[in-house]
Amino acid sequence: MVRTQIQLPEEQHRRLRAEAHRRGVSLSAVAREFIALGLERQEPATEPRRHEALLALIGCGRDTATDVSVNHDKYLAEIYDEGHR
């Protein structure tokens, strides 16, 4: 690990300290976790993560189509393509 010093607004410091106390871990551990989550959100989805996200959609809605169980990949690809134009 690399030692780093940062300055935080008082409110953020208070909230981090409270969360660390609640969990029984160090403030540094909570800060590392939150930083990792923030960085993960900034990274473009890798193909496996994108695939997992699409698979999670299966069964989450209702439709009148009767062939969804057979053609779900086709429908998911259409939805995915529409969202990335």
Image (cartoon, rainbow, N blue to C red):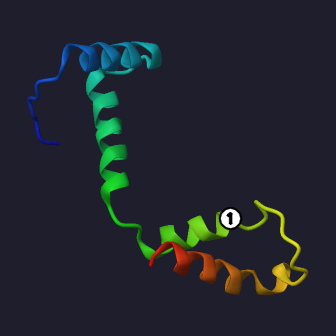
How far from the left and from the top, in percent, is residue 59? Answer: 79, 64
Query: Which residue occupies 34% across, 36% down?
Result: 34
Q: Residue at x 75, y 80 (%)?
A: 72
Q: Position of residue 74 (x, y in %)?
A: 69, 87
Quadrant containing the N terminus is: top left
- Which residue has dot 1 on it? 57
Q: Nearer the viewer, residue 43 or 74?
A: 74
Does residue 71 lie above or below 35 as drawn?
Answer: below
Name the residue at 84% across, 70% down. Answer: 63
Q: Nearer the viewer, residue 24 or 7?
A: 7
In the picture, measured across the screen, residue 12 lies left or right of residue 85, that is left
Disc 1 is placed on an element classified as loop
Amino acid type for the residue under numbered disc 1: Leu
Tell me if 6 is positioned left or right of 24 in this view: left
Q: Quadrant of residue 71?
A: bottom right
Asked whether, in this view, residue 14 is left or right of residue 52, the answer is left
For label 1, count other residues whose C-alpha is less than 10 Å away and answer few (under 14), some (14-19) or many (20+): few
- Position of 11 relative to 2 (above/below): above
Q: Nearer the viewer, residue 58 or 84?
A: 84
Residue at the spot 82% in from the left edge and 79% down from the top edge: 68
- Number of disc labels: 1
Return the x and y of residue 21 as percentages of the image width and height. Answer: 39, 13
- Quadrant, the C terminus: bottom left
